[in-house]
Amino acid sequence: MKSKHVLFLSLLLIQMGCNSSTIDTNLPVDESIRLNQIGFYPDQQKIAVILDHEGADDFVIWDLEKEDIVYEGKIAGETTKTLSGHDSRIADFTPFTQTGDYILVLTGVGKSYPFRIDSHINKELGKASIKAFYYQRASVELDKSHAGIWARPLGHPDDQVMIHPSAVSLTRKAGDLVSSPKGWYDAGDYNKYVVNSGITVGTLLSLYEDYPAYFQKFDLNIPESGDQIPDLLDEIRWNLDWMITMQDPEDGGVYHKLTTAKFEGMVEPHLAVSQRYMVAKSTTAALDFAAVMAQASRVYKAYFPEESVTYLKAAEKAWNWAKTNPDVLYKQNEMNKTFDPDIVTGTYGDTNVDDERIWAASELFVTTHNLTYWEELEEADQSFKLPSWNQVTWLGYYSLLRHQDSISLLPQEWMATLKINLLAAARTQIEGVGSTAFRNPMETNVRNFIWGSNSVAANQGILLLYAYKQSNEKVFLEGALDNLDYILGRNATGYSYVTGFGSKTPKYPHHRLAESRPDLPPLPGFIVGGPNPGQQDGCTYASSFADESYTDENCSYASNEIAINWNAPLAYLANALEAISQ
Ligand code: G3I
Ligand code: 9MR
């Protein structure tokens, strides 16, 4: 240890009134200091939450390179209670703006995990959150040059997918084989579900549409890197190539999912070889498909004009199918009474298709300007609803707002209402944040803690970024940063919930790709589901409080699984913040 460092620690210990012989000069990390474990932008807010430790009021920021104190601060006086009853106070060091690597030292207590202040603080996270999709690719070998230690043989060619009796049509009998390769594995399991792919692709395409310039030079080191197309669009195409095969070419209907009958074991993809099935068409799948294909049609037009036409035709065909089949819901339990074999994998069942219809109509309208689609929207519910796989209204409305200049034929009043509702929801989102224990929109309502709650945090961040874009009010940008701070460590468990990003990160995610290779660190860049008091997996949790209902155990699919629809909003949040900060 450098002599200056020893001197600092000695001075600190004297200042703390401690006997240096009773304290190790390597101060321990104290987990009651909760902060973003990646770090902060120089000119933005920087706060840590300190739990308990009454009487410890002083803190310093210690520069790890200079080995020096660079900032001294006092913890704010007001105390808030966490859900489980801890006292929470705030250490605010926003005025400190110097780039570098630091720890926060709470005098007399201990130090925080390290963090960085940097004008590109979320760049690597942003990339990794999209590279994660490459790791989820089906039907392809991942080679060393792109996947490094996570290289693996080809799994799930999906060129012999069996038509399940629930999916029979005039031209496809039960037992027929069809080809439906590529796509991303949905989550910790290896199945592919159209509904969940829908919101995932929609969120990623919107990220591109919102910040196209940022993605022009954005190298993901994927096999397509170096071609004429932005890497983000190359990666999304891997899934679009699969999605388009989920449409029955005969009638335009879209199968709900491509799946094994039961979940596979915790084995590598090339060893997970059970028969895969095309299962039941559904209205939700058709409309989500229509929305995605309509959006893809305009996004890829400049790069692949022919595919752009194909995408739009596919979208219109799916839309028309949904028109004549408006309420074909996916009900797995009922289906299993009629058809063999039983299908017991993810359901993504949804009893309301109004939001899927709004999303599809919005995307089709933006792409075609055809007033038929506007007619579907004219009377539609315009109230704000945070996007999730079963609530996609605002994926469509975000698109309408993004393209408001090119769709000026819509009644101004109707568009104005959308904007008003967006801003009001964003304001509600940040209202009360100041009195929550972790200074976060998540904690303003205990109902935010559902299965996949971390994606609620990310989607809240997206809402706030749209509000920021529409209004330029900095308070919304700050709210979005609060959401990312929450995800990366300023929360009730002290985890940074993204694998490989931060000091205390998930090591045992419910993720077959990772669990089947326990010799390797978990694949990086994946956000886990997060606190979920439902605890439906029956694993052992250390706490039953909503915001602490998380366990870093392989068994915990209800709190520690990964999923594409959770990574997409993380990717949006991290990359949009980078794009905005450039
Ligand atoms: O709709 C009700 C709502 O009315 C109620 O207030 C709320 C209270 O918790 O529950 C809501 O239902 C929940 C539903 O998600 C919608 O959010 C269910 O309790 C909850 O069990 C359900 O969890 C879903 C889970 O599958 C089980 O079906 C998750 O959203 C969904 O992300 C997850 O997805 C799985 C796939 O099936 C398979 N692949 C992995 C993937 C991730 O775990
Ligand atoms: O591994 C499955 C995970 O991807 C799903 O999200 C979860 C809920 O549908 O189910 C997991 O599979 C479990 C199954 O439901 C019950 N038996 C144990 C399986 C995990 O080991």
Image: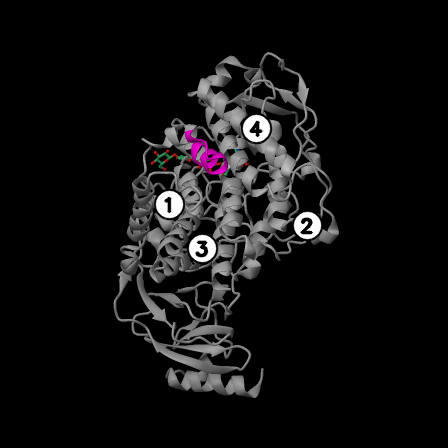
Mark pair 1, 3: CA separation? 13 Å
Residue at 43% across / 83% down in the picture? 12
Some atom of ligand 1 lies within 8 Å of the CB belonging to the residue at label 4: no
- Given contact means CB atoms under 8 Å apart, are the residues at marks 1 and 2 in contact? no
- Which is closer to the viewer, label 2 or label 3? 2
- Given contact means CB atoms under 8 Å apart, are the residues at marks 2 and 3 in contact? no
Residue 314, numbered label: 4
Q: Where residue 84 sits: x, y (%)?
A: 32, 54
Res 332 visible: no
* Camera-side residue of 366 and 102: 366
Q: Which residue is mark 2?
A: 228
Q: Where residue 63 sits: x, y (%)?
A: 50, 78
Q: Is residue 12 above or below residue 317?
A: below
Mark 3 nearby-residue class (10 Å; few <14, some 14–19, many ≥20): many
* Camera-side residue of 370 and 269: 370
Identified by mark 2, the residue type is Gln
Mark 2 nearby-residue class (10 Å; few <14, some 14–19, many ≥20): few
Q: Is residue 291 magenta?
A: no
- Which is closer to the viewer, label 3 or label 4? 4
Identified by mark 3, the residue type is Ile
Q: Assign the magenta stretch its main secondary structure.
A: helix
Q: Which residue is mark 3?
A: 487
- Looking at the rendering, the stretch of residues picked out in magenta corresponds to 361-371
Q: Is residue 117 above or below residue 253?
A: below
Mark 4 nearby-residue class (10 Å; few <14, some 14–19, many ≥20): many
Q: Which residue is mark 1?
A: 449
Q: Is residue 363 magenta?
A: yes
Mark pair 1, 4: CA separation? 37 Å
Q: Is residue 389 above or below residue 478?
A: above
